[in-house]
Amino acid sequence: MAWTWRYEKADGSAVNPTVGQEDFPTQGDAESWIGENWKQLVEEGADQATLLDDGSTIYTMSLHEA
């Protein structure tokens, strides 16, 4: 299994930030990583992130503070 993130603008168009293009061994590792790096992703134009497990969507979340 490979856990990855896909980053998008609010309209669903793809964003390719300089960070975050890696595979994670577990869901927890992926979620910890995004918790530490979401601000940089927003600075690079991402509005939302989708967690993928071997290409299957698990969930999509906003990267903006509530």
Image (cartoon, rainbow, N blue to C red):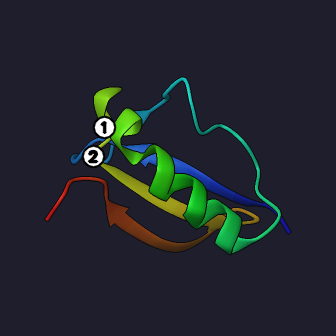
The amino acid sitting under disc 1 is: Val
Query: Where's residue 42, x and y in %?
Result: 30, 37
The amino acid sitting under disc 2 is: Asp
Crowd around label 1: few <14 · some 14–19 · many ≥20 (10 Å): some
Task: Name the residue rendered at 35%, 26% in the picture.
Answer: 44
Q: Sequence order check: which comes first, mark 2 or mark 1?
A: 1
Q: Nearer the viewer, residue 50 or 63?
A: 63
- With respect to residue 15, does 22 lie above or below? below
Query: Where's residue 26, x and y in %?
Result: 77, 70
What residue did someone put label 1 on? 42
Rounded to the nearest angstrom, the CA distance separating label 2 from label 1 is: 6 Å
Tally the marks. Answer: 2
Query: Where's residue 19, x and y in %?
Result: 57, 31
What residue did someone put label 2 on? 47
Task: Name the residue rendered at 30%, 53% in the picture.
Answer: 63
Q: Are marks 2 and 1 in contact (CB under 8 Å)?
A: yes
Q: Secondary structure at mark 1?
A: helix
Q: Nearer the viewer, residue 14 or 23?
A: 23
Query: Where's residue 16, x and y in %?
Result: 50, 29
State left or right for residue 66 relative to residue 51: left
Image quarter hosting the N terminus: bottom right
Q: Secondary structure at mark 2?
A: loop
Image quarter hosting the C terminus: bottom left
Task: Name the residue rendered at 83%, 63% in the picture.
Answer: 25
